[in-house]
Amino acid sequence: MFIELLAPAGSPEALDAAIGEGADAVYLGLKNFNARMRSVNFDYARFEGALKALRRAGRKLYVTVNTVFEQREADRVYQLLKYLAALGPDGLIVQDFGIVAMVRECFPSLKLHASTQMNIASARGANALSKYGVSRVVLARELSLEEIRACRAATNMELEVFVHGALCVSASGLCLFSSYLGGKSANRGMCTQACRRLYRHNNDEGYFFSPMDLQLLERLPDLAAAGINALKIEGRMKSAGYVGAVVSAYRLVLDALAEGAGEERVRESIQAAREILRGDFARRKTVFYFDGENSPPDSWLRADQDGGTGIPLGKIIRMEGSGEERKGLLAPGPDLPKTGDSIRLHRADDTERETRRVSVAEDGEDGRWISVPQGFGPGDSVYLIRRGPAGGHYAKIVPRNLENFRRRPGRDKAPEFRLPPAGKKKDTFPEGLYAAVSRVEDLYPLQAYRPARVILWYNQKTAAHLLGGKPLPFKPDDAIIALDPFFPEAMSVPLAAGMTRLMDMGYMKFIVNNPGHFSLFREQHPALIAGPYLYAFNLWAASLISSFGAEYFVSPVENNRQNLEKTVEHSRRSLAFVTVFAFPALFRIRGDLGGMYDFDYFTDGRDEGFRLVHADGSLVYPEKPFSIVDKIPFLEKAGFHRFIVDFSGPPFRKKDFKAIMEAAKNAAPLPGTTRFNWKDGFHPEETGRAQSPENSQKPEALPLG
């Protein structure tokens, strides 16, 4: 069986290296709507030139269009897709259901691959996408080999697996940390890598959430035997030298497997490939969750591991000069940088990092002097990330003369798109305040406030209570069961059995947060609400999600007022739920970090506080919750009438329930809260955003228990 080796091409030089070392395919992004907006990416002429050259060479090219888009951007997305349909790349890697819908409706010739950002971790999730034109799924990275095998056995979809490169501590597509800190959403390609930061707890500090790098080189025989179609290398922000070395290593082992070489020959190829990777200038290596229960968090997470990459060269001892002549002294060592090498400087207080090429490298009596930019000085760390100029020895893929490549996206308007107006509904979901909790005991203090319905998050503890036959303080008809957005293959059978049991008990209202959830309700037909993690940021996405079987939906907590109103037309606002209070889960971590860390509160370099909660894995919440309870009258005037007050997250005290519910009922502002992205929206791609007074206030946080 042929296994495709897929490499990143974050720059033309990296493209040259990937193809030069034997990649079967590359993936790259253009200037918009891709999950690596901070990489070089390709302009249109270079992209077209690369596509033509790769066709001639018999290699494939996939384009990443793997971010969510807002309704105001529908025309730009349409223009980009029309441009790509005219050129015909081998596939698009996508996250937004809106792009899936637009391609299906307008550009069916385009082949679609579901990005890992779509958070598909089960065969049920993969199969849910197959009828919408998606031909390949990039599985979430948090799966074990056994789960990957089970996915392969239960779906005919092409399956792609990440095998090498940087990891996210949060489950794929579910990180809100960067967005919470300033609108730079990972779902928009603007991630500021909050997991790589230095955090503090009392007198301890560490990189508590910075994972090692994935390396499944030694497990390629297992993946080949499992029937995986494509192996993916992460690294669109990495150098050409890095890409070339990693592709070379994996090519060596895949060729040995393809030749049907014996076990000894394969072992020799793996050993040789390890030697190639010794100089990849990356972090420690891990197999992440690949070994299942034998992959505890301390096998992929080290608090003493610097958040960046590179070979440590030591700290700057002292400085001399100023301006262009400014230089710092490094102590003698085996890997001192030379002129032309690339280094990364890291401030001792973790407030700034910078990558630059060494312009001056002079030997001194006490070490080597190197050029150092303003803002760095004694005590700051230096890392070697690349030796000399990169990629010079590879044949150029992109033609030097680009005059014939003049196509550009046009100025077309996306087709006028309107969902049918909402019909008259039964009183399944009445207007008013809905209260969500993640602990059964938190339902009791809510009885006094008579919410329209209660929402109970389904987790190990709540499942044990419900399936054990224990009653809730609310009738089944007054309760909605919310499903966790991370739906791994290992949960497929028990979750299906649990849902059937709950429906038999009379629970017939559910919030679904993953495409795979819809298949759990095929035989019976409960009332379904599309949850916030299905990311309905535009009309096209709302349409596709509705076709899954959920007409009602919860607006994403990252959303802003203007986009909400543009996405949900007046005639359909009776179907929308708006979260007006929540502690948004910034990290959703599959592993339970309780065995590693004995704290539940920590801060960052700006003294922002966060809480670590262990529940079906681990979750990180901000100290300051999101609140727009005082905006409820304005939302009602705009036609929205269903609001969620979410008490899941850190523990609440009885008086907290009272303060928050009364504030929501009276539309009174809550102190110590943040607007999140409600007013300013996402951080724009082109420029910085001015911080509004609402977002810039830093009042004392709510004193929750």
Image (cartoon, rainbow, N blue to C red):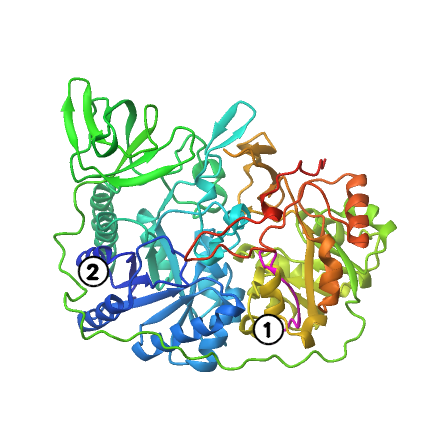
| Location of mark 1 (residue) | 548
Which residues, given as a range, are shown in magenta? 546-560
Instruction: Tell me the quarter of the image containing the C terminus.
Output: top right
Q: Position of residue 118 (x, y in %)?
A: 49, 61
Label annotation for residue 262: none
Is 324 contained in the magenta span?
no
Instruction: Tell me the quarter of the image containing the N terminus.
Output: bottom left
SS state under label 2? helix
Q: Position of residue 390 (x, y in %)?
A: 18, 48
Q: Residue at x 51, y 25 (%)?
A: 204
Q: Position of residue 327 (x, y in %)?
A: 23, 28
Do we see residue 437 in this rendering?
A: yes
Q: Nearer the viewer, residue 1 or 374?
A: 374
Magenta stretch: helix, strand or loop mostly: loop
Label annotation for residue 19: 2
Considering every residue shown, the one lying at the far top of the view is 365
Q: Is the residue 231 above or below the residue 575 in the image?
A: above
| Three-letter amino acid code at the position of disc 2 | Ile
Judge the density around disc 2: few (<14), some (14-19), many (≥20) Cα neighbours within 10 Å.
many
Is 556 contained in the magenta span?
yes
658 left or right of 232?
right
